[in-house]
Image: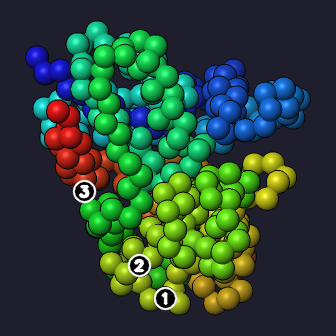
Amino acid sequence: MSDKAVLLVNLGSPDSTSIEDVRRYLEEFLSDDRVIDSPKLIQQFVLRCFILPKRPRESAEAYKRIWTDEGSPLIVTSKNLTKLLQHEIDPHVELAMRYGSPSIPSAISNLKGKGIKRLVLVPLYPHYAMSSYETVVVKVWEEIVKQAPDIKVETLQPFYNDPDYIAALVENSQPYLEKGYDHLLFSYHSIPVRHLKKADSSKAHCQITPNCCRSCSPVHSTCYKAQTVATTDAFVARAGVPVDRFSVSYQSRLGREPWIEPYTDQVLEALPSKGVKRLLVMTPAFVSDCLETLEEIAMEGKEIFLEAGGESFEMIPCLNEHPSLVRFLADKCSELFSKFA
């Protein structure tokens, strides 16, 4: 029996569309100090007084719009991806969610029980952000130290501009690009501007250096916005998208503080007045389609665009279970296993 394994980690989802399950999920998610990074007392005050009284009911209704007979689209897709990757590589492939089930603690327990000694950790996030990639890595390491300190770990780094990842995005998008379009909108999940500045270890680049996202700097290794710009630039160059036929926006903001702009909902409303009638939208920050892509963009976003005068709105699916993603992950896992002594 092999002592090697791969751990895929995605965001997670409620166990059902019931208000109780959604509340439980949101409470875990929004209690993460890397998601709402205020002092704990303030975080919990905001969460329990302003978010949890109303948002679970609203989110439950949104989840009902995308829920399938098999369950949460993100969970179903992630499980299918796990099976497909297992067909391509010999090491055992385990799946966990940062929030909800299957949990990271249960995954590490399972791996320990299987006698795993060498683990490749694959956070299913192309870009670095403290509220996504970083929190996964930290949580996995906490559980490794607690439960199985003998397991050696290699971690897949953010792959936002990896040529093979960009090639996978292009391959997945090509059938939609070939249909014709007026404009291609890249909608990335937004994060607070404060998180951008917090991730700048130099404290002298982000939002300070002119055109900071395209000014070469070591701090880009932890700069979410610079990485989204790099993904966009690499994609349009490889796919041959004309410079005047694409733009970038950011979605899913929460609260009143400044988040990365421009905001996707506002861009969708404005595009028809600029002559855009046939719109393509893609969401490269997400590997798997989820609430933010299927409901927020493909449903609410489409409605905003069409009501503003647009005529055709089409959503390019996330990579999900695409063969190019499976190949990419298999190759990266093989590379990382070769690093073990």
Q: Horizontal placement of 183 versus 50: left or right?
A: left
Direction top: furthest residue: 113
Measured as percent of width and height from the top left, residue 130 is found at: 59, 44
In the rendered image, which residue does mark 1 sit on? 243
Query: Which type of secondary structure does the marked residue at label 2 adopt?
Result: helix
Task: Please say whether residue 283 is visible from this viewpoint.
Answer: no
User: Are dots 1 and 2 in contact, CB under 8 Å?
Assistant: yes
In the rendered image, which residue does mark 2 sit on? 236
How many C-alpha atoms fall within 10 Å of the one at disc 2: few (<14), some, or many (≥20)?
some
Q: Based on the displayed image, in which of its 4 quarters is residue 117 positioned?
A: top left
First along the sequence among labels 2 and 3: 2
Q: Nearer the viewer, residue 340 or 166?
A: 340
Instruction: Tell me, for residue 324, which label it has, or none.
Output: 3
Q: Amino acid at mark 1?
A: Val
Q: Residue at x 58, y 63 (%)?
A: 225
First along the sequence among labels 1 and 2: 2
